[in-house]
Amino acid sequence: MKTEMLPCDERGISAAAGLLKKGEVVAIPTETVYGLAADATNEDAVAKIFIAKGRPQDNPLIVHISEVEDMEKYARDIPDVAYRLAEKFWPGPLTMVLPKKDTIPMATSGGLDTVGIRLPSDMTARRIIKSAGVALAAPSANLSGSPSPTSAQHVFDDMNGRIPLIVDEGCCTVGVESTVISFDGEGVRILRPGYVTFEDLLTVTENVVIDKGVTAELDAGAVVASPGMKYKHYSPKADIVLVEGDLADFTEYVGKNYGDGVYAMIFNSDAKGFPYRYVMYGDNDKENAAEVFDRLREVDEIGAKKVYVRCPSKNGVGLAVYNRLLRAAGFEVVTL
Ligand code: TXA
Ligand code: MG
């Protein structure tokens, strides 16, 4: 299959909508990462997403809508707090897991009786959903296990020959995937941290907990709140090690372990005088989020074999970056 790349103008949007209506898979931009979209209500279309990504069938897909009211087409028993969160954070990078209606096939929900719903803020994404006339199931548009794509080129690198079209809108602004939450009555549980932070959610309800799977490795066979938690994720070929400690200790540690193919991934402000090979991923949690996946792809391109990463903040959006890096590192953390 030839993979076409079109800009996010009228032509790109109508080509995408045409393919989606025919049950095909199209890569589309969102504010978080690029998504691999198909008609969420069409089992055959959704099956093509799993094939293109090489994704385990029990890992559910997020359903993307373009109007808040559409939530009720696909979800039922929606708690009041979900409406308040939608009002505050939609359109935007928040996914709410709710009991699903029969409009969502089991293929989309990975066999679960719940569905994750999100209303993206990216205008191209919303125009494509509207033009397609149906909600779109869309996981991140990377090969399963690889770093999520934050540019159309990343998508092309993974999906060339596997899908007919990529709609190109340049680089994603947020850079890490949406915050995924579930509900326990009026209480909220963070299953995957993202740009909408724990602190943000607390402004709407005081009842917010962070699932332990966010920062801890799960035992083999453990029952997980979100199937995505149990898979190896975001991994470049290079071996990633997350290192907690100040710059002086970090520098000394890299020095002790330095050799062929060893790189450091540091903050921009660390770079002056840093004596070893490095890449940089920004200076605060939002910059770290915007750059982390691009750097995880870059280290493979430059032939890194081992990468020691300076640990990001664990607060605010930093928690999302920390969560992705923990998985990229296979939970290998060195505390100095
Ligand atoms: O920002 C995003 O969320 C991007 C863009 C494209 O919208 N999408 C994305 O999808 O990251 P994906 O499939 O790569 O990650 C979805 C995560 C997975 O960890 C999955 O297990 C979890 O959300 N999830 C989806 N539906 C769920 C459900 N019904 N119950 C529990 N977890 C769910
Ligand atoms: Mg993903």
Image: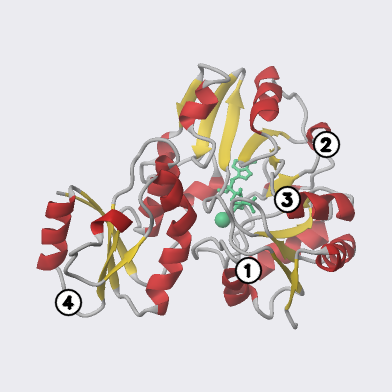
- Camera-side mark, 3 or 2: 2
Residue 153 image point, x, y percent: 59, 73
Residue 133 vs 144, above or below: the answer is above
Question: Alpha carbon of mark 1 to alpha carbon of mark 2: how far?
Answer: 28 Å
Q: Quadrant of residue 69?
A: top right
Secondary structure at badge 1 equals helix
Question: Alpha carbon of mark 2 to alpha carbon of mark 4: how far?
Answer: 55 Å
Asked whether the beta carbons under mark 1 and mark 2 sit within 8 Å of each other, the answer is no
Asked whether the beta carbons under mark 4 and mark 3 sit within 8 Å of each other, the answer is no
Image disc number at residue 259: 4
Determine if residue 45 is in view: yes
Mark 2 or 4, nearer chain start: 2
Which three-letter amino acid code belongs to the residue tagged 1? Ala
Q: Residue at x 58, y 20 (%)?
A: 204
Secondary structure at badge 2 equals helix
Which three-letter amino acid code belongs to the residue tagged 2? Asp
Mark 4 or 3, nearer chain start: 3
Is disc 4's CB within 8 Å of ligand 2? no
Which three-letter amino acid code belongs to the residue tagged 4? Gly
| Residue that sits furthest to the bottom in the current view | 2
Q: Which residue is tagged 3? A: 108
Residue 293 image point, x, y percent: 47, 60
Pointer 1: residues within 10 angstroms few (<14), some, or many (20+)? many
Which three-letter amino acid code belongs to the residue tagged 3? Thr
Residue 333 image point, x, y percent: 25, 52
Q: Which residue is tagged 1? A: 152
Secondary structure at badge 3 equals helix
Image disc number at residue 70: 2
- Camera-side mark, 4 or 1: 1
